[in-house]
């Protein structure tokens, strides 16, 4: 290392061979680009089907904007709707939505990897890591094993959920009538999508504790992450001692999820005990406040009318929507581990500790930097989007409703699907903005950023000289 006089920087020897510059279209796709493109391709196909396929609607079909919006909401497992799923779509149309939800929830890279392996091939290592979400974690679990277990977990849990809902709903819908709602809601809940065959989501089932409990368990299972589910399975079912250890990642996921669910449950019960829950029995108040804590992470079903809830409830819901589920799951949001690492970072700094620790382990500084970067990008995206939606609304003379617009924007970006009723009334520009937010939120801000800059990134020869600044 040698400093060049007069430059103020440090020269590093570049040992990597510079690749010849070739046209953009001749280069292979980077993993982040492949990840983003797989979702864009599925959204495009879904929008074309919704726009042109006959027999999907009971009345007039969707226009281009609403077709793209609905396809994006389904593929990104968001759940925001511009038309009523229960009355606007035929059973065939609902089946198309359910297929898009399932494909979007599993991820096209997972399905592609399964098909390649089933045909005797081997997916690339980068594709396997993207499909499983295990870029930096869990070296003890083979990627191909995890990919097949993702599919297995998905269909087993969805099947068990559908059977449980079917048995509960037979008295309400009948032997045959309960089949389709049970299957639809089980898949939608596990994929954290929030689409419902009921016009009012689960509001007409708020006095059915078993329904609330089953869907809550499906949401939690879908939001834990497949890596954590794999480790839990190995911990309790595997005979090999080497596979019984639960990693720091999964411990952090389980602890953070538990704290958020229990903490939200208590606060929602306090906020709405004499509010929207006032007319319910004590037991139903407890089950619905529990559901209010589970569904923002990021399912989108609602058993209460959020437009009638208090500002405290809606703001707490916004916070939980921002945090979201866990990495490698069907949920969106900033992710539980990101939230936990930021909290651990603050705690370590308050104690003047040089490293972030959890469960007697130090967390690498690179991971802390990724968590910080994800938080900054997510927060910046939400702030900018709320500003744009407010600006569009004000320019068109809409009534000021800041909290409602913030609620819908956070719901879209974190692929939640909860709504205070504003989405169907949004203008076309605002709907396209939410489309962009849903795609960005599902594929991940860091994946989007990587896909945009990967072509321009090259290894630099210099590290500039350090000079400090004052903060705080």
Image: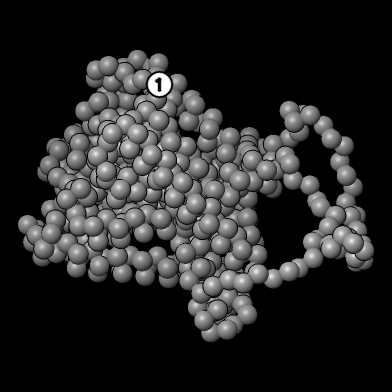
Q: Where is residue 68 shown, x and y percent of the image?
A: 42, 27
Q: In the displayed structure, would residue 29 be above or below residue 336?
A: above
Relative depth, front residue between 37 and 382: 382
Q: Nearer the viewer, residue 179 or 337?
A: 337
Q: Residues within 10 Å of mark 1 (few under 14, many from 20)?
A: some
Classify residue 457 as left or right of residue 229: right
Q: Can I make out residue 461 in this image?
A: yes
Q: Return the x and y of residue 463 as percentages of the image width and height.
A: 80, 61
Q: Quadrant of residue 138?
A: bottom right
Q: Is residue 283 above or below residue 397?
A: below
Q: Quadrant of the C terminus?
A: bottom right
| Residue 27 screen position, x and y as percent | 76, 33
Q: Residue at x 92, y 63 (%)?
A: 5
In this view of the protein, which residue sits in the foreground, 175 or 341? 341
Residue, x 27% and y 30% (percent of image)? 83
**Residue at left 19%, top 33%?**
176
Q: Secondary structure at mark 1?
A: helix
Q: Which residue is mark 1?
A: 64
Who is closer to the viewer here, 223 or 112? Answer: 223
Residue at image x 63%, y 80%? 354
> Percent from the top left, x then y, of residue 211?
21, 51
Task: Tell whether 159 sits left or right of 449.
Answer: left
Evaluate whether residue 77 shows in this view. Answer: no
């Amino acid at each position: 290392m040698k400093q060049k006089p007069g430059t103020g920087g440090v020269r590093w020897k570049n040992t990597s061979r510079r690749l010849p510059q070739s046209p953009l279209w001749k280069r292979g796709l980077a993993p982040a680009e492949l990840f983003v493109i797989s979702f864009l391709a599925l959204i495009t196909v879904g929008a074309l089907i919704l726009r042109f396929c006959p027999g999907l609607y009971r009345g007039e079909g969707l226009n281009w904007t609403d077709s793209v919006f609905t396809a994006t909401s389904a593929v990104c497992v968001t759940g925001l709707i511009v038309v009523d799923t229960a009355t606007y779509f035929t059973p065939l149309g609902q089946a198309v939505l359910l297929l898009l939800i399932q494909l979007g929830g599993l991820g096209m890279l997972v399905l592609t990897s399964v098909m390649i392996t089933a045909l005797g091939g081997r997916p690339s290592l980068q594709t396997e890591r993207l499909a499983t979400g295990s870029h930096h974690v869990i070296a003890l679990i083979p990627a191909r094993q995890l990919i097949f277990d993702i599919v297995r977990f998905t269909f087993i849990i969805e099947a068990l959920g559908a059977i449980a809902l079917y048995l509960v709903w037979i008295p309400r819908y009948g032997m045959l009538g309960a089949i389709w709602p049970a299957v639809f809601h089980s898949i939608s809940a596990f994929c954290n999508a929030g689409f419902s065959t009921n016009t009012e989501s689960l509001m007409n089932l708020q006095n059915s504790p078993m329904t609330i409990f089953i869907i809550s368990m499906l949401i939690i299972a879908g939001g834990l992450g497949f890596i954590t589910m794999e480790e839990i399975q190995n911990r309790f079912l595997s005979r090999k001692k080497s596979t019984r250890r639960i990693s720091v990642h999964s411990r952090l996921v389980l602890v953070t999820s538990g704290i958020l669910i229990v903490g939200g449950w208590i606060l929602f019960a306090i906020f709405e005990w004499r509010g929207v829950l006032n007319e319910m029995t004590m037991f139903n108040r407890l089950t619905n406040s529990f559901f209010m804590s589970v569904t923002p992470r990021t399912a989108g079903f609602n058993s209460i009318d959020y437009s009638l809830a208090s500002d405290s409830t809606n703001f707490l819901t916004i916070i939980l929507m921002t945090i979201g589920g866990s990495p490698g799951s069907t949920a969106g949001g900033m992710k539980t581990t990101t939230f936990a690492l930021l909290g651990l970072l603050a705690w370590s700094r308050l104690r003047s500790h040089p490293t972030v620790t959890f469960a007697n382990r130090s967390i690498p500084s690179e991971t802390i930097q990724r968590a910080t970067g994800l938080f900054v990008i997510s927060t910046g995206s939400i702030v900018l989007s709320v500003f744009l939606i407010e600006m569009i609304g004000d320019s068109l003379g809409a009534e000021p409703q800041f909290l409602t617009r913030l609620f819908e924007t956070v719901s879209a970006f974190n692929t939640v699907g909860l709504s205070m009723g504003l989405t169907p009334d949004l203008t076309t520009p605002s709907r396209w903005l939410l489309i962009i937010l849903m795609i960005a939120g599902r594929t991940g801000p860091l994946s989007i950023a990587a896909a945009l800059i990967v072509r321009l990134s090259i290894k630099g020869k210099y590290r500039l000289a350090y000079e400090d600044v004052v903060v705080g």
